[in-house]
Structure formats: C-alpha cells, structure tokens
Amino acid sequence: SQQGEEDPQALSIQEGENATMNCSYKTSINNLQWYRQNSGRGLVHLILIRSNEREKHSGRLRVTLDTSKKSSSLLITASRAADTASYFCATDAWAGTALIFGKGTTLSVSS
Amino acid sequence: DAMVIQNPRYQVTQFGKPVTLSCSQTLNHNVMYWYQQKSSQAPKLLFHYYDKDFNNEADTPDNFQSRRPNTSFCFLDIRSPGLGDAAMYLCATSPVGAPTDTQYFGPGTRLTVL
C-alpha cells in the first residue's frame, strides 16, 4: 500500500511565484525525503527531514514536517522555469531499507 | 564524477522476448535498488541488494530477476516481458541501506514492449 500521497497532483505557476506541495503519510516514520524528477529522467534527492525535526531549509527549498498530522510540505520560493518537474515525497517503511514513494506533484513553471 | 549509469536508455523488446537492463555505479555503494515506474505513478521497489544479499519485494513478479556480479554492476532480467511491463526502470544506490540514506538514481531505462 502506498505510504505517501502528494497534493496537489499538478500545479502551474508563473516564474517568481512560490510553489507549495504537500505530502501525507499513513504510518510512523523515521524520516521523510523529497525527490525531484525531470521528465523522462531519474530522481534527484532534494532534502531529508528526520522525524524529530520540524523544519529544514536548503537554498530556495523549505520543508516542514508535522508528525502529529502525518504530513509534510515542500515550499519552493521564487520559482524558476528550471524547477519544472515532478516532486515526490518518500518515507521509510517500517521494515528498514525500502523507501515508499508517493505519486508525486507535477509542477509547471512558466516564464 | 561519481554516478549511476543505466544502459540502454531506451529498450524496445517484443512480447515474451527476454530482455536485460544494466546498471553500473562508481559510488562504491553497498546497496543497489531496482524500481519500476509506470506512467504518472510512483516508483515501485522491485528488489535490492545489500552487497551480495538479495532482497525481493513480496509482490515482485517471478518474471523479474536480478544479478549483481560485483559491487559496481547490477542487472535486471525480465524473462518474458508482457505489455504490462512497459515502464521506466530506475536503478538507485545508497551507501549503507539505512532508512536515513539518500538514494542516488540513474537516468532510467524506458522499456517498450511490442
């Protein structure tokens, strides 16, 4: 069964605007990761937040984690056309090494 | 640059004709993963190797097999591809395989089954 669910499924914005996407999950986690996938390419790791952290920043990215609500959000500030991609959250399964990916949010940034 | 390489990037095969996808890494990571990603879906883990220890996901079809002859290389064999096996196949690595590990992905191989 799928662990993470991203919302919205698709998001279209203009360059310079902020983009927020959300991830909800079902069971307890040790950490949550966000990955980006450009069309037809592999995934690129963006950021990892541990279950005892509430917020983490990396450049224009800000990730929050609310374990009480079992949800996370990814904020991309001052979006650029190059940010156009699909964004996936991934949580660690209880068994250990497997990452369970959500279906992703497709972000389109137009100039 | 250290990286994960997948060959070929595009593979076309016929229904029922065996096909092998390859993955190599220069990161010297212990763990290698194979994911299947169908259009507009989440990547789904098929199996992974921790060094030479093979770990199969419970719902991975028997049609899918894997080999890891050494640390650097890992192969995905599809013995009798069906139309439903058309997908992007992603190889990934991680240093130790802990839940907190970042995974490093290759560019993927897109498989078409005719």
Image (cartoon, rainbow, N blue to C red):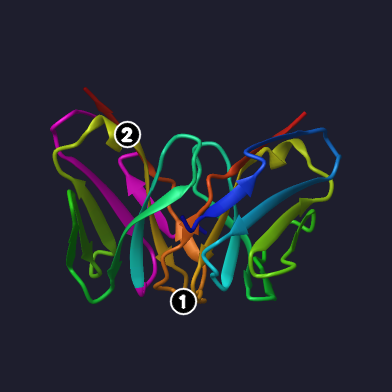
**Mark 1 falls within which chain?**
B
The residue closer to the viewer here, B70 or A59, is B70
The location of residue B24, given as percent across then percent down, is 62, 57
The location of residue A35, given as percent across then percent down, is 37, 52
Residue in the image at 19% along x and 63% along y: A56
What amino acid type should be assigned to the residue bearing mark 1? Answer: Ala
The residue range painted magenta reads: A2-30
The residue beneath circle 1 is B98
Q: Is residue A13 magenta?
A: yes
Q: Is residue A98 left or right of residue B83?
A: left
Residue in the image at 36% along x and 75% along y: A30
Residue in the image at 57% along x and 70% along y: B31
Q: Outermost residue, front direction?
A: B1
Q: Quadrant of the C terminus of chain B?
A: top right
The residue beneath circle 2 is A84
**Mark 2 falls within which chain?**
A
The location of residue A73, given as percent across then percent down, is 23, 54
Residue A11 can be seen, yes or no: no
The location of residue A82, given as percent across then percent down, is 29, 34
Q: Residues within 10 Å of mark 2 (few under 14, many from 20)?
A: many
Position of A90 relative to A83 (above/below) = below
Q: Residues within 10 Å of mark 1 (few under 14, many from 20)?
A: few
Per the image, label 1 sits on a secondary structure element best described as: loop
Q: Are marks 2 and 1 in contact (CB under 8 Å)?
A: no
Distance of mark 2 from mark 1, alpha carbons?
30 Å
Residue in the image at 27% along x and 50% along y: A22
The residue closer to the viewer here, A19 or B32, is B32
